[in-house]
Structure formats: structure tokens, C-alpha cells
Amino acid sequence: MDFLHTDLETLHQQLVDKEITATELVEATLANIDATDPEYAAFLTVMKEEALVAAKAQDEAGIDADNVLSGIPYGIKDNIVTDGVKTTAASRMLENFVPIYDATVVEKLRDAGAIGVGKLNMDEFAMGSTTETSYFKKTKNAWNTAKVPGGSSGGSAAAVASGQIPYALGTDTGGSVRQPAAFNGLVGMKPTYGRISRWGVIAFASSFDQVGVLSRTVKDNAHVLSALAGVDSKDQTSSEQVVPDFAADLTTDLTGMKIAVPKEYLGRGVSEEVKATIMAGLETLKSLGATVHEVSLPHTKYGVAAYYILASAEASSNLQRFDGIRYGFRAENVKNLDDLYVQTRSQGFGDEVKRRIMLGTYSLSAGSYDAFFKKAAQIRTLMINDFKKVFADYDLIVAPTAPNVAYDFGENSDDPEITYMNDVLTIPVNMAGLPGMSVNAGFANDLPVGMQFIGDQFQEAKLYQAGYAFEQATKLYEKTPGGAK
């Protein structure tokens, strides 16, 4: 079992040919997690019994030869609910919460024969860019364990990049799939808003949240998205758009593809090493037949400020349900009902979650709504229009995923604003509800650099096409952490 050098199609064929059984594959995966997770701290809950039962049932039923995910293990970010398995959102507030149903994405993967092996660490309630806000542990970067893995889907990224699992589910509200994918040298896809059902995903900011996929290769990622995508009667924001086979007909020829590069995405704040790596990547895309031109997305500079007002406002509303009454953590030795609310939320939420609740509540208050929330919503519309103008003439936008490579733990802990600005290149995609995908573009200081492909709504196939061609030309996915300390 070597997930670092084996793709899904190869694993699937081994299962179909009975070179290995699903049970043997899951047993090897669980053994590897036991051996390596003390180093990476990616998992919050290992679903050993559930995974082995599912694997046995899969072997008895027979591997589905037409379904590439059949019998293959994967990981689940711990804000995606799982029936009978703890789902904590990495918060003390939900430390012992056990849901009674599966999220739609978990149902879909189970129907495809995929086997969930565990719940993965994250920033608390998906609020953070380093996975340091988790109540339980600090996940390490797979390439250098002294560095952060990114966030909020840091556990998902570290587990895939270290070879514990072949792919994982994450969620992306402002870059939380793409940025950890960049920091760990992976493919991270955030599809169009509505492409995947959000039913059963613990809400952070409902108009931004989207389930995404982290994998080693573009084609693996495409296979998983095909299984996850589609309309869901339980989620009225899910789209009825036809779901293509994203993994089919991928080629290495980009002739005729028009790529735009926003000058704002390569400006001040982007490290010289990242900039140089992206420029080299653009030359590779040109050599594959694409044309590349500079464009402008002028309202990008307002994106971070507008996002944190809007997302925090939605978070303050969504997190009202955690009050110590119905479920989750409840403070003890309280004096009255008001004290129960105050003590439960004071003790149950971490600093970053409380910071965003307060910011969101303030921006929604009567005296601040017009000055902050309304203005931020207007900026969102301007950003959407910026993208529309570009996509009228271009197939894709290419830019860095993050302005820097992974950094040391605690490096920005004293100044949240610096951490927020690390999302400056990913946030616009969520503001406009577009698909965005990060692929490994190379290395700087021995750490991966992410290159971001951005498409128009429901144009994930174009992202996969460009990403696949680039990946096959560079073969960067063949480079692995190799036990980095």
C-alpha cells in the first residue's frame, strides 16, 4: 500500500483483479495511520471498526468494475457530519457530538463504494488558515513538520500529502481547500458554489461554504468530484447543472486556450520566490499551446476586508445555535439562563471564533449595517462583475494560490490581520462563487508553491484540463515529502 506513488485507477484495477481486497487495503491504511499520525497529527477520529465493516461488505458484494472509487479509503474533514461518528468541527463546543445522519457527500461516496477511514483535523469551525485554532491538536505540514499545513483543511491536506490516504474531503469558505493544498504540494479543488450539496456540512458562512477535494493528482481529483457533484433535494442551493465525467478526455494539448493573469495577483505582498515559480509555470502553459495575457481585476484589493465582514456576519448567525441548550458543550455551575449562554459560549468557543462572531454581530447591528455589511455586499457584486468581464474573453485565470509558502507555527499568531491577508488570492473565488483549483507549480525553499486555476461558473472541466496538461508536463506529483522532519 503506497498512496504516494499509486493513483486511484491503478488501485481500482488491483481491487478488480483481486490482487488485493478492500479489507486488506483498509487494514494497511489503518496500520499506516497508526504508525505515522503521531508525527503529522492529521486525524481527530479514526473510524477503524466502521471502515473494516464497510470493507468486508464491499468484498462480499464485489468491487464495482465501473466505479473507480469502489473499495478505496478516504478521509473526511471533521465539519462534515458522519452518522454515529464524532463530528467536532475541532471545537470544544462539539467535543462529544455524535450525529445521527450522514452528510450528502458522505452518502454519495458510500454509494460509490468508497470507505471513510477517519475524521480530519481543521481550524475550529473552519475559521483559520493554519489549523492552529483547533481545540485538540496542531497538524504538521507533510513536507516540513516545523511548518503549518495551511487551513482550515490542514488535516485533510497533511493526511493526503503524507500518504496516509489517497484523497480527502475538505471545505473551502475563503480558500480552505486550495491554500492547504498549495502548502502541501497537492491538487485542491473548490468547485462552483452549488456544484456539491452542503447538506450535513457544519455551516461557517453559508453563501461561501463549498465542499472540495484534496488529492495527489488532477485525474484522481476529477474522479472524486464526478461522484460528489449534483443536485440534492435537501439543499436548495445545490445546482441542477449536468455533471460531466470530469476525468474523461483529459489531454496534454492546450492549443487555443486563452489564459488571463491578473496583475493584482502578482503585486505587492507576493514573495519573489512564489512569483518566479508562477511565471515559470506560465511559460510551461504557453509551451502546451495556451496563450497568456495580463488583465486587471481592480476590486481585488477590497476582497479581504469585504469577505471578513460578510463571512463573519453569516458566522455570527450560524453559530447562534450553539447555546448550551440543545446539544454540544454546556457550562457548569451557572447562575441563570443568561449566565448559561455567556459561560457556554465563552468556554466552548476559541479566540478566533469569538473574534469573528463579534465582528459579524457588530457589522449587522443597526448602527453599522449600512456602513459595513451593505458596503461589503456591494463590493462583492463589483468583484463578480470584474470576473464576468475577464471570462467574456478568456477561458481561465491563472495566479498564485498563496502569496508565500508554508511558514513556522506561531509566526503570525500575534497579528490576525497578517493571517487574514494570506487569503487575499483565494477569497475572490468564493466571493464570486467560482471554481478554483490549486496544483503544485514547483518549490521555493524546499516547500511547495501552489498555482491557482480559476474558471467561470461550472467550468471545472477547463480547470482539470489545464491542470492535467501542466501536471503531465512537469511530473511534479512524482516528488513526495519522503519522511521530511
Image: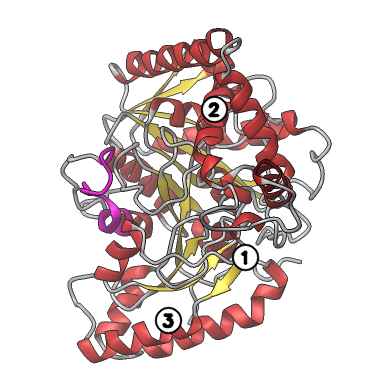
Q: Residue at x 37, y 36 (%)?
A: 435
Q: Pick whichever of labels 2 and 3 is earlier in the sequence.
A: 3
Query: Could you tell me how far apart the alpha carbons at marks 3 and 1 are, in whole angstroms?
Result: 19 Å
Q: Which amino acid is tagged 1? A: Ala
Which residue carries the number 2 mark?
Answer: 313
Mark 1 neighbour class, 10 Å CA radius: few under 14, some 14 to 19, many 20 or more: many
Mark 3 or 1, nearer chain start: 1
Q: Is the magenta stretch mostly helix, strand or loop?
A: loop
Alpha-carbon span between mark 2 and mark 3: 37 Å
- Hey, which quadrant is residue 41 in on the image? bottom right
Helix, strand or loop at label 2? It is: helix
The crowding category of the residue bearing disc 3, from other C-alpha atoms within 10 Å (few below 14, some 14 to 19, many at least 20), is some
Along the line of sight, the residue nearer the viewer: 191 or 133: 133
Label 3 sits on residue:
50
Q: Is residue 315 above or below residue 260?
A: below
Of the numbered discs 2 and 1, the one sitting upstream in the chain is 1
Residue 265's image quarter? top right
**Residue ID at (52%, 60%):** 78
The reply to whether residue 269 is in sight is: yes
In magenta, the rendered stretch is: 223-238
Q: Name the residue under label 1.
A: 42
Look at the image and tell me whether residue 400 can be seen. Answer: no
Labels 3 & 1 near each other (Cβ < 8 A):
no
At label 3, the amino acid type is Glu
Compared across the picture, whether 145 is left or right of 34 comes to right
The image shows residue 363 at horizontal and vertical percentages of 59, 19
Q: How crowded is mark 2: few (under 14 residues within 10 Å), some or many (20 or more)?
A: many
Instruction: Please name the amino acid that badge 2 sits on.
Output: Ala
Q: How far apart are marks 2 and 1 (CA)?
A: 29 Å
Of circles 2 and 3, which is in front? 2
